[in-house]
Image (spheres, rainbow, N blue to C red):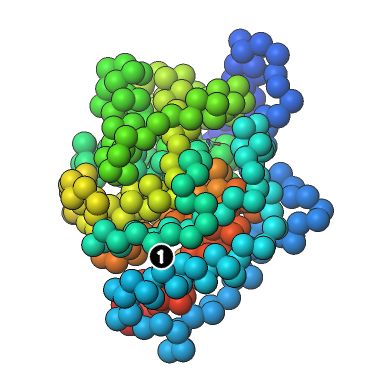
Amino acid sequence: MKHKISNSIVATLVFAATVSASLNGCAGSRPEQTQSAEYSRQPLTPTSTVTNRSTTIYLLTTTGSSSGAGIRAQDVSTSETLQRVVDDAYAKFKDDNSGRNADYIPYLASVSSELFGIAIVTVDGRVFVAGDTGYAFSIQSCAKVFTLAQIIQESGEEEVLNKIDVEPTGLPFNSTIALGLHDDQPGNPLVNAGAIATVSLVQASNATERWNKILASQSAFAGEQLQLIDEVYRSQTDTNFRNRGIAYILYNSQHLFCDPLEATDVYTKQCSIGVTARQLAVMGGTLANGGVNPITKQTVINAKYVPRVLAVMMMAGFYDESGAWAYTAGVPAKTGVGGGIVAIVPGRMAIVGFSPRLNEAGNSIRATEAINYIVQQLDLNLFGSLQ
Ligand code: DON
């Protein structure tokens, strides 16, 4: 897809406002908490130590071994080393109470901000955990990665290039400005627009089949049957006017491939899947292991497609902080407003952090810190000469 400055940015925004208003009218009275603005424009509390958009990531230090002082790559296979680095990361960041829970989905505001868990799953199926790794949180945007993998597996890699694109937007995850700047094209499968389009590309003849296929696929990545968290689904359904507006914009520009409300509803359901940090690490471990679940040994996605998925994660997994994350940590990762982050080290492991307090871009602060710490300690940066 070629990107051109849209001749209809203003028209798009007017259209979005009109759609949103009309949806609001249909849905009845509008709740007070809605995602009415692009995410990063919502300020954090004055007590937060995070003062601007990318501060969290820029403040991360390279505490590990880029200078040779940390644990060497050959130590990665040592179980003692992996458990020690997980425990160290937990101890080091557990008292960081900066940021705050997402609240544009009311349920997320009610989740305990104190929860903090870290999990590693290696490609040979070993599991290392610390903290709250048994708590089921909503997967949110981390699900986008696995639905992307699903449609590539189902329809081939050209489908994504031709119908969604894989370019970072440099804008918040729920941006409508990004749509306007790019002729109302979705951008990439990891922003909301692209993720809703991805859901619409799952081959299904109705909403039930679409949802069942997505849940089955996400469960195969996890190696066990995952469940919808109904309260999250209802809370998000009550407030996701903006996503419905995005779906209608995409439908209007022929970048959505099923009914807009069906796509938004199934997308909302996939965001509401419950996962523990351990389960999410198995999901990521499946990508790290070339598409084979390291626990069940089931092939979930053909190995040749895994690099496509990881490339998109590297470019867009942290939304408008993706560049800073790549610069700092150098591993593909995906964040979710439920507080989860899954990072993939190909051929080695997946690292998951879970902590509900987010920075202004919607990325979990302690999960970012913990994963970055582990990456530095174990010399896992993919751009490092030792890898
Ligand atoms: O569509 C939404 O707004 C959310 N359900 C998912 C967004 C999200 O997780 C962004 N993550 N950092």
Per the image, the residue denoted by label 1 is 331
Q: Quadrant of the N terminus?
A: top left
Foreground pick, 17 / 346: 346
The residue at the point 35 percent across, 18 percent down is 207
Residue 192 placement, left or right of 113: left
The residue at the point 64 percent across, 16 percent down is 24
The residue at the point 23 percent across, 62 percent down is 124
Q: Is residue 82 visible?
A: yes
Residue 303 placement, left or right of 185: left
Measuring from the top left, give residue 193's x and y in whole percent. Answer: 47, 36
Foreground pick, 207 / 297: 297
As helix, strand or loop, the secondary structure at mark 1 comes to loop
Against 305, is 29 above or below?
above
Against 151, is 349 above or below?
below
Residue 116 placement, left or right of 83: right
Measuring from the top left, give residue 60's x and y in whole percent. Answer: 59, 71
